[in-house]
Amino acid sequence: MRLSAALLVGALSLSAVGCDDFLDVNENPNAPQTVSANLYLSPMLHWMVTSPQFDGRFIGRYTQQWYLPGTTFSTWDRMGYDPSSDNGGQLWRDVYWNIGQNLVDMMQKAEAEERWDLLGVGYVIKAWGWQQLTNVHGELIIKQAFDQTRFTFDYDSEEFAYQEIQRLLGEAIKNLERTDGAVDPAYLGRTDRIYGGDRTKWLKLAYGMLALNLNHFSNKSSYKPQDVIAAVDKSFTSNADDALLAFPGTVNDDTNFWSRTRNNITNYRQTRFVVGLLDGTEFGGAVDPRLSRMLSPSPDGVYRGLDINTLNFGGLAAAQQPQNFFGYVGAGGLGLPSRYIFSEKSRLPIMTYAQLQFIKAEAAYRAGDKATALAAYRNGVAAHIDFVNARNRDDNQTPTQITAAERDAFLANPNIVPSASQLTLTHIMSQKYIAQWGWAHVELWTDMRRYNYTNIDPASGRQVYPGFVLPVNLFPDNGGKIAQRIRARFNSEYVWNRAALDKIGGLALDFHTKPLWITQP
């Protein structure tokens, strides 16, 4: 909720005799008139990490990270949506409301007090919000978003959104580079639950977000891979820079969103597609050591995934059905040891070093610099192996650590790390998918849409995402087309802002199949 003030106003008429006031009206310490600028920060950082997971329940079905088995195909597994529902609208709600005016107020206070480090963090958060929203929904309300004199709001183009994100990141970088004024790591660190007040790491995150933004232009003539590489090189230098949020796991609301305690993914199961990327099916029999540390085996010990075009468990016997992501049959696992990012205290990222290395690898590959691409690609795979180990230590999870011998043998396999001349986009984007699986839902989906889900990589002669198959039974409103965006949040836009939606085609039943501007030539 907004940290607004509650002001008690009292009017008392006294006679003109000389006497003391008999009533003092004091400030309420539980509802202060003004608050310190840094007090706004922690809740917003929570939503930066958690909001994408809320919507990831649905985006993850488009990208086949997971599947919801049942006796009928769900809307999202058919690349549809839930009409008259806010499902898929959490990011919209949080960017405009939970973060919204709070961020405006924090930045205004920080600027007035010359707290350039906190102001720089504010610009990062604002850029992050527009980046997430435009990549999920397309057109956005930016210019009029916090105009409190309006009751309806006009949408801005995706192109403007991308320009604004770059401008905001430029402001973030400028402010985070400053050491004058009231820059104070102790002040920032009191509520900075990501980096503990280290502005230099926030500066690296700003450059990482800039690299991500610039790399999305890969289908456009304006794409500049060298600018992407330069931004990555100013960003994270190792996993130690990963932007991670820790979860105390003491009550429901401070527990990892994906944990069994939160019960948000209990009925979901891993797909045949993601298992195929890890079990050797798609890469010459090279079994990934992350398979048994990220995914769940069936009760018989075999790692299987579900076919998204087959109802329920596809006739698999009980012993063959994939267990839940915590490693248990059915809805089991409550209060028991879990795995990877699915435990109560598993830390979740905003961005990781591995993710950025794959962004660099793709940019270098597109620039024709295969040597740089291979080095970044290998760094990304190795870093994500270390990331998996770290996440399985966060809460003393069940899976064993990947040993150095396992890691080195995997990286030495030419099916996984080929020579520079043999490296392909299939290698790069498949490994980036694995590194983002389960948490980086918006970037992962943006990647897949840039490659139209099933594009063929000319160098490999295979799909960029090998093994990915489209739903046979698409949602009726799709008109035979595949999902490209999620409709704007129902309760704010389709109830209160329909005229503005109509101007961008948002009332059409198949609006969610309209390609994003950024994915087009």
Image (spheres, grey):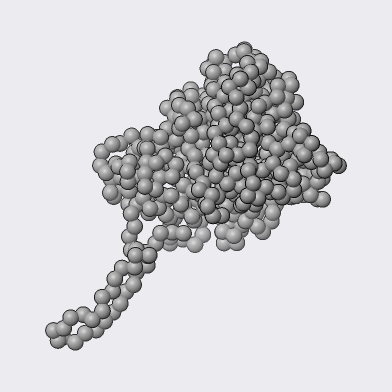
- Location of residue 435 in the rendering, given as x and y in whole percent from the top left corner: 60, 32
Q: Nearer the viewer, residue 154 or 42?
A: 42
- Location of residue 380 in the rendering, given as x and y in whole percent from the top left corner: 56, 25
Left or right relative to 338: residue 360: left
Q: Please identify the quadrant where the C terminus is shown.
A: top right
Q: What residue do we see at 30% from left, 42% from top?
A: 184
Left or right relative to 68: residue 246: left
**Looking at the image, is 427 positioned above or below residue 183?**
above
Q: Nearer the viewer, residue 501 or 203?
A: 203
Left or right relative to 270: residue 162: left
* Residue 15: quarter of image: bottom left
Residue 418, visible in the rendered structure: yes
Q: What residue do we see at 81% from left, 46% from top?
A: 312
- Location of residue 64 in the rendering, given as x and y in whole percent from the top left corner: 70, 39
**Looking at the image, is 179 positioned above or below residue 192?**
above
Q: What residue do we see at 43% from left, 55% from top?
A: 101
Q: What residue do we see at 65% from left, 57% from top?
A: 85
Left or right relative to 347: residue 466: right
Residue 144, visible in the rendered structure: no
- Location of residue 413 in the rendering, given as x and y in whole percent from the top left corner: 66, 16
Q: How many marks?
A: 0
Q: Nearer the viewer, residue 15 or 226?
A: 15
Q: Nearer the viewer, residue 511 or 330?
A: 330
* Residue 280: quarter of image: top right
* Residue 374: quarter of image: top right
